[in-house]
Each structure stands twice: as structure tokens, then as C-alpha cells.
Amino acid sequence: KHAMTHARWISCILILLALYGAASGKVYQKCPLARALDGLQISSRSFISNWVCLINAESGADTSKKTVVNAEWSNYGIFQISSKTWCREGRKGGHCNMQCEDFLNDDLADDVECAKIIFNRGGGFAAWKGWVNKCKQKTLPDLTSCWN
């Protein structure tokens, strides 16, 4: 009987860990992030260090990051995309015509698609305060070793 209780306890913990793993996002390291962005053709390679810096400044490269700005809007995902302008909560909408919650998973394709729209319509990298404060005219991450 004691062994059965022990086994149930372990199964419970494993189920909770699996659920947490499924719900939580991914935190990218520098090179895997650079290669993922390059693979999704976010920009020419010469600009990817700016994107990596921006992402680290905005979200710490955490795909599941959601920041509540105020009662009206929040910022979502690795690029901290705002529900005020670019996406809508619970439905597709905004200038990217996407649902904000879709930016909280590990699939970066939709995030990159929206980030390109923000870049093109919002004044380039300057559309992100994190880039302005932590990357503009500063030393960018060295990605040389990432392309080998």
C-alpha cells in the first residue's frame, strides 16, 4: 500500500512538470536565437545582432513573457508585441492581424512576421524602447561563432 501511494505521488509530480513544460515558453541562448531568426529570414545577417540585442532587452529571450502595461493593454512574447496596436487579445486583429496569445509559444514564425511589420511601419528598431535604451549606439552581441 505504501509503495502505491509513493508511485501515485511521483506520477502526480511528473504530470505537473509535464503541464508546466507545455505551458511555459522557451528561453533562447544567443546562437540558437540568431540561427532561428536567420532561418526565418527576419533580415540580412548584418542586422541579426540588432535583433538579438532587441529581444534580450525586451523579453530576456523568453518566448512566454507577457507584460501587463495597464488595464487596456499588454505586451507579448519574445518581441513584447503590444495589444494596443499590433495584435488583439483573444482574437485576430491589430496591424499584424494576429492573436496576441499566439506570440507566447515556441513557434517564432508568427512573432517574426509581426516584428517585420512593426519594423516597417513603426520606424525600424526604434519602434522598441528596449532597443533604443540598450542597443542603439551600443556594443551589439558578437554572433561570429554562431554561423560556423
Image (spheres, rainbow, N blue to C red):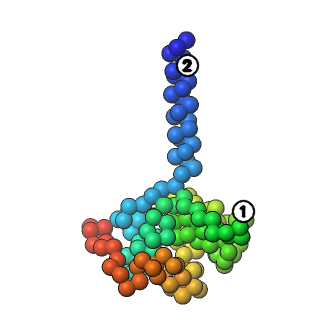
**Quadrant of the snapshot with the C terminus:** bottom left
Residue 19 placed where, x, y %? 57, 42
Label 2: how many Cα within 10 Å (few below 14, some 14–19, many 20+): few
**How far apart are the alpha carbons under marks 2 and 1?**
41 Å
Q: Which residue is mark 1?
A: 90
Residue 8 in view of the camera? yes
| 17 up-or-down from 46: above or below | above
Residue at 55 percent of width and 45 percent of height: 20
| 66 up-or-down from 132: above or below | above
Report the amino acid beneath label 1.
Gly
Q: In what element is the residue under mark 1? A: loop
Is 46 on the left or on the right of 122, as rendered?
A: left
Residue at 59 percent of width and 86 percent of height: 121
Dot in front, 2 or 1: 2
Question: In the displayed image of the protein, which residue is found farthest to the bottom?
Answer: 123
Residue 89 placed where, x, y %? 70, 65
Residue 5 - label: 2
| 52 up-or-down from 27: above or below | below
Residue 76 position by quadrant: bottom right
Comes first in the chain, label 2 or label 1: 2
Report the amino acid beneath label 2.
Thr
Label 1: how many Cα within 10 Å (few below 14, some 14–19, many 20+): few
Q: In what element is the residue under mark 2? A: helix
Looking at the image, do the residues carrying marks 2 and 1 touch, with CB atoms under 8 Å apart?
no
Residue at 45 percent of width and 74 percent of height: 54
Question: In the displayed image of the protein, which residue is found farthest to the front?
Answer: 70
Residue 43 placed where, x, y %? 44, 79
